[in-house]
Amino acid sequence: MVVSQISMGTMTFGSSCDQKESFAIMDYAHDHGIDFFDTAEIYPIPPNIEWVHRSEEIIGTWLQSKDRDSVILATKFCGPGHGWFVPPVRTGRTCIDRHHIRRAIEGSLRRLQTDYIDLYQTHWTDPDFDYRETLTALDELVKEGKVRYIGSSNETAWGAMKADAVSKELGIARYQSIQNNFSMIHRRFEDELAQVCKKEKISLLAYSPIGAGVLSGKYNHGEPENARFTKYLRSGQERQRAIANRFVNEKSLATAASIRLIAESLNCTSAALSLAWTFTHEFLASSIIGVTHLDQLKELLKANQIEISNELLNQFDEISNKYPYPMGHWPFK
């Protein structure tokens, strides 16, 4: 299965982006060569019982006006919150076992108004749970035709190799993709997971390729109103504040400022340039972008016309050497 170099993330659809704007964004993306749309049962963000499932519902309604074969559709099912937060699905009793996978897929198929999912992914994994049960349950969905391919998200190098070994041992469907955070402020994927992807032929679907908006430079002059991390920093929730501080910090802002100088010399935006940088990695299948307004999508699509030379790559590496690992280690160190 081959997907467009840029894929449309939908985690804003139903919260910060209403249905009308969501339709306009998806129409424009579809008309301009984006055929891969990614969502999740827990979307939109931040996770909230008041609007959970809305992203899938919006996509499902929009999909009725399109040729289903022209859209490659990906969604994800929840794992346990591990005490960090309570997922607003199935009354918080989430697991990656057969029962919950069955419950999740039936809900997603109903909301998306389709009879199959092109790529079905674990939203986050559970290292304490047996990969055999998760993968066996997902393999059943593939055999039944409800799912074409399976993938993981927010997975570690150990987890990716463990899952692959289990699939080979049992002769069942394997994770063909891994959807992880990857950008100029979060290059940890290159440390170990990149080698796993190249050697085992697993494709990266990079989320937050512009650092969740940080690399656009919008946080370099304070806390912009209505921006995601402004809301998170002002939130009373520990999880949201911790995430915001991980993305918005001295090193990440310095990285964004350095990229802006390069972008100005190339007469392009920092966001488009940062997105184009992700395309240079051989283990990447697609970079997932998220927007709240159509104008943002139009600007990001210009990344397809930006040529990244070896000289430019060296400049990016110099920035990373000067401000290494802006997002630190997980969790929040």
Image (tube, grey):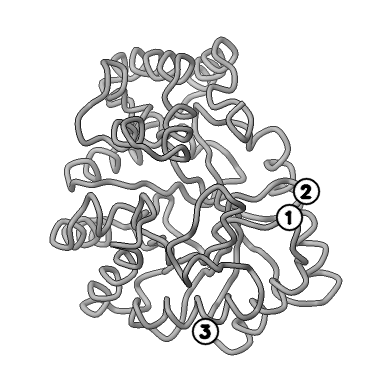
Q: Which residue type does callout 1 highlight?
A: Pro
Q: Mark 1 points at which residue?
A: 127
Q: Which of marks 2 and 1 is nearer the N terminus?
A: 1
Q: Name the residue under label 3.
A: 146
Q: Earlier in the sequence, mark 2 or mark 3?
A: 3
Q: Is residue 211 left or right of residue 267?
A: right
Label 3 Cα neighbours within 10 Å, binned few <14 / some 14-19 / many ≥20: many
The CA distance from mark 1 to mark 3 is 26 Å
Measuring from the top left, give residue 27's x and y in whole percent: 20, 62
Q: Nearer the viewer, mark 1 or mark 3?
A: 1
Residue contact between numbered discs 2 and 1, judged by CB atoms under 8 Å:
yes
Q: Which residue is found at the position 39% from the left and 37% from the top?
A: 212
Q: Which residue is found at the position 53% from the left and 41% from the top?
A: 181
Which residue, as the protein is rendered here, is positioned at the far right?
169
Q: Name the residue under label 2.
A: 158
The CA distance from mark 2 to mark 1 is 9 Å
Q: Which residue type does callout 3 highlight?
A: Lys
Element marked by disc 1 = loop
Measuring from the top left, give residue 137's x and y in whole percent: 67, 79
